[in-house]
Image: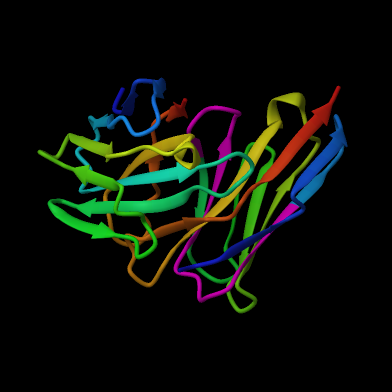
Amino acid sequence: SQELEQSPQSLIVQEGKNLTINCTSSKTLYGLYWYKQKYGEGLIFLMMLQKGGEEKSHEKITAKLDEKKQQSSLHITASQPSHAGIYLCGAAANNFNKFYFGSGTKLNVKP
Amino acid sequence: DAMVIQNPRYQVTQFGKPVTLSCSQTLNHNVMYWYQQKSSQAPKLLFHYYDKDFNNEADTPDNFQSRRPNTSFCFLDIRSPGLGDAAMYLCATSRGGTGSPLHFGNGTRLTVT
């Protein structure tokens, strides 16, 4: 199965600070997906990266894909309390319908 | 709004007593997934259906079964729940193929007493 390692496991930042979360895959990536999960709820899709070097942004969240390194990073600019939650990266295996996740990065933003 | 709905949100069952969790979707997606998520862990893929084709993960215990009677509904049956099966169970759907993100329900939290 695909293994996805996320770092850090948890993060506490002051409101307004920038932060970066990393995701490294043990196998070739066929697309990398970022999700956000609030405690006790399902996963909310944030964005999808498919090509090496691709970068996408949504509001203050930017994600990049380094296909050669089998890595992706998620960067939040000027963090807000609403950004708090668990961020998970996910990837499809070479069977595109098998989908695996990292264990997540728990983010707290202090007002 | 098109969505993925899981019922119930919270389920309590007794050790060894069969339990069924349900998932429905209005997205008309081909693929439906069941994941098990324990505290502070990655969601673990149990199985998925592509239309009626069932795909089991090699390490999914035989205690876990699934049914997909039609496109819209998928069920997770736990035949004899153990204490270790207490977890959040997440249902997700996708169109299938490359570039198809998963859409999740809000999950069912299972407690085994």
For residue A14, what is the image quadrant? top right
Give the x, y percent position of residue B70: 10, 38
Q: Name the residue at the bottom extreme.
A: A68
Give the x, y percent position of residue A94: 38, 72
Q: From the viewer's side, name the closer residue of A76 and A56.
A: A76
In the picture, the quarter occupied by the N terminus of chain A is: bottom left
In the picture, the quarter occupied by the C terminus of chain A is: top right
Left or right, B110 with reference to A69 = left
Q: Residue at x 26, y 38 (%)?
A: B77
Is residue A66 positioned above or below A14 on the image?
below
**Residue B10 magenta-drawn?**
no
Left or right, A31 with reference to B39 = left
Q: From the viewer's side, name the closer residue of A21 and B58.
A: B58
Give the x, y percent position of residue B20: 27, 31
**Residue A26 magenta-drawn?**
yes
Q: From the viewer's side, name the closer residue of A43 and B61.
A: B61
Q: Residue at x 35, y 41 (%)?
A: B92
For residue A85, what is the image quadrant? top right
**Image coloring type:** rainbow
Left or right, A62 with reference to B49 = right
Give the x, y percent position of residue B16: 34, 34
Q: Residue at x 32, y 39 (%)?
A: B80
Is residue B92 positioned above or below B44 on the image?
above
Q: How many marks?
A: 0
User: Which residues are drawn in magenta?
Assistant: A21-44
